Image (cartoon, rainbow, N blue to C red):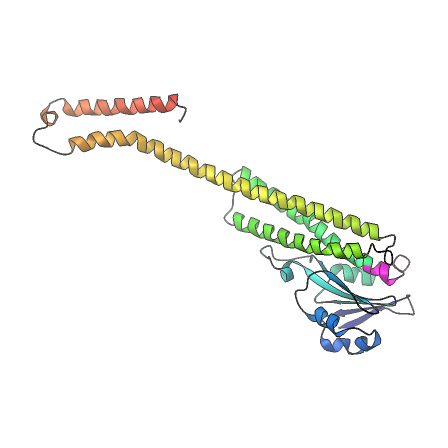
């Protein structure tokens, strides 16, 4: 669906928004704005990463952002991010996307004409708004999830799917860090003299802040996984130590029982009246000696 948001009557440039695009939607626009076939194909292709390309009379930009809702067990590019493809020149901006993109809709409904009075300012603003969604995801969701998982790890309140959920968070963070790395070319492009304006520094600040947040949360996630496996390993070691102690107590006792269970004829103790209670006392004394030795070594 094609929507004309701005035109020459109310702005210095045209802004055309296309949702759920098809190749036919570009039939007139391709001729009017001299759009290259390669950029149109990239626009319609699914799964493109952030990039910026320069053509003869316009630029082609792909930005990605975080949707308002996505499945917690998502870990692919198309599941955890939404894409906006942008054709822009001095006199026009064409935004293309699938589904609803919140920051685009909000901007279209309440467009600040006095603030964004050129296509360059609009593109800069869209890139900034897309980057803010990554920042908001860390602050409003991922940090809170990691805090709750830390409580599960350290207070031994682990739920059944704890490790699975933590794995998906790590996957999401790793994928977003790749996307942010590709955003660097876009941020650097807007700092070129031909595109630099009063808002480009804001874009750079948002990018630097997002990079720092995701680097920190990636380190925290890795450390939490490491702590979890260490705690599980220590727990397993405690169990093995307990089983070993039990086996050490019973090994000499089993040895004594095994000797007197052979039932040879020439075994005087078997016929001795006090043989049974004496053996029981010896076994008890042996168990006490082992217990005292373990206590002295501080293994109990």
Q: Name the image quarter holding the N terminus.
A: bottom right
List x then y, in percent, for residue 199.
85, 53
Any part of residue 106 in sight = yes
Residue at the far left in the pictured view: 265
Which of the 4 image quarters holds residue 265? Answer: top left
Q: Is residue 67 above or below residue 208?
A: below
Residue 23 versus residue 59: which sits nearer the camera? 59
- Give above or below for 213 relative to 251: below
Q: Residue at x 60, y 54 (%)?
A: 72
Q: Position of residue 59 (x, y in %)?
A: 80, 65
Q: Quadrant of the C terminus?
A: top left
Is 24 part of what is drawn in magenta?
no
| Left or right: where 145 falls relative to 256 | right
In the rendered image of this protein, does residue 98 appear above or below residue 214? Answer: below
Locate residue 176, reporting x and y percent: 66, 54
Q: Position of residue 157 (x, y in %)?
A: 52, 41
Q: Which quadrant would residue 38 be assigned to in this image?
A: bottom right
Q: Quarter-wise, where is residue 133 in the image?
A: bottom right
Residue at x-position 34% and y-position 22%: 293
Rendered view: 152 above or below 283? below
Position of 268 compared to 100: left or right? left
Residue at (91%, 58%) from the top-left corner?
114
Residue 128 at least partly seen:
no
Residue drawn at the location 76% of the way across and 70% of the way down: 18
Q: Along the line of sight, which residue is nearer the eye, 42 or 258?
A: 42
Residue 114 inside the magenta-drawn segment: yes
**Could you tell whether 203 is left or right of 237 in the image?**
right
Q: How many marks?
A: 0
Which segment is the magenta one? 113-123
């Amino acid at each position: 669906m094609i929507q004309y948001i701005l035109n020459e009557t109310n702005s210095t440039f045209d802004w055309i928004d296309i949702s759920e695009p098809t190749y036919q939607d570009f039939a007139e626009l391709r001729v009017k704005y001299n759009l290259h076939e390669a950029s149109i194909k990239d626009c319609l292709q699914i799964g493109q990463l952030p990039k910026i390309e320069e053509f003869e009379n316009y630029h082609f930009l792909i930005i990605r952002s975080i949707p308002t809702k996505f499945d917690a067990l998502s870990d692919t590019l198309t599941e955890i991010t939404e894409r906006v493809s942008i054709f822009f020149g001095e006199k026009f901006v064409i935004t293309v996307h699938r589904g609803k993109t919140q920051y685009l809709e909000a901007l279209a409904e309440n467009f600040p004409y006095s603030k964004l009075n050129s296509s360059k300012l609009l593109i800069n603003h869209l890139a900034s708004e897309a980057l803010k969604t990554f920042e908001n995801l860390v602050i409003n969701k991922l940090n809170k999830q990691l805090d709750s998982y830390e409580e599960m790890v350290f207070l031994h309140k682990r739920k059944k799917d704890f490790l699975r959920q933590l794995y998906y968070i790590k996957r999401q963070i790793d994928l977003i860090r790749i996307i942010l790395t590709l955003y660097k070319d876009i941020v650097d492009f807007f700092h070129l003299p031909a595109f630099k304006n009063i808002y480009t520094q804001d874009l750079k600040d948002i990018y630097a802040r997002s990079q720092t947040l995701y680097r920190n949360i990636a380190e925290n996630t890795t450390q939490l996984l490491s702590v979890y496996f260490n705690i599980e390993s220590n727990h397993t070691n405690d169990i093995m130590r307990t089983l070993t102690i039990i086996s050490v107590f019973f090994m000499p006792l089993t040895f004594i029982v095994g000797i007197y269970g052979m039932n040879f004829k020439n075994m005087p103790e078997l016929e001795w009246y006090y043989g049974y209670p004496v053996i029981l006392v010896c076994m008890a004394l042996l168990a006490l000696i082992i217990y005292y030795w373990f206590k002295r070594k501080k293994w109990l």
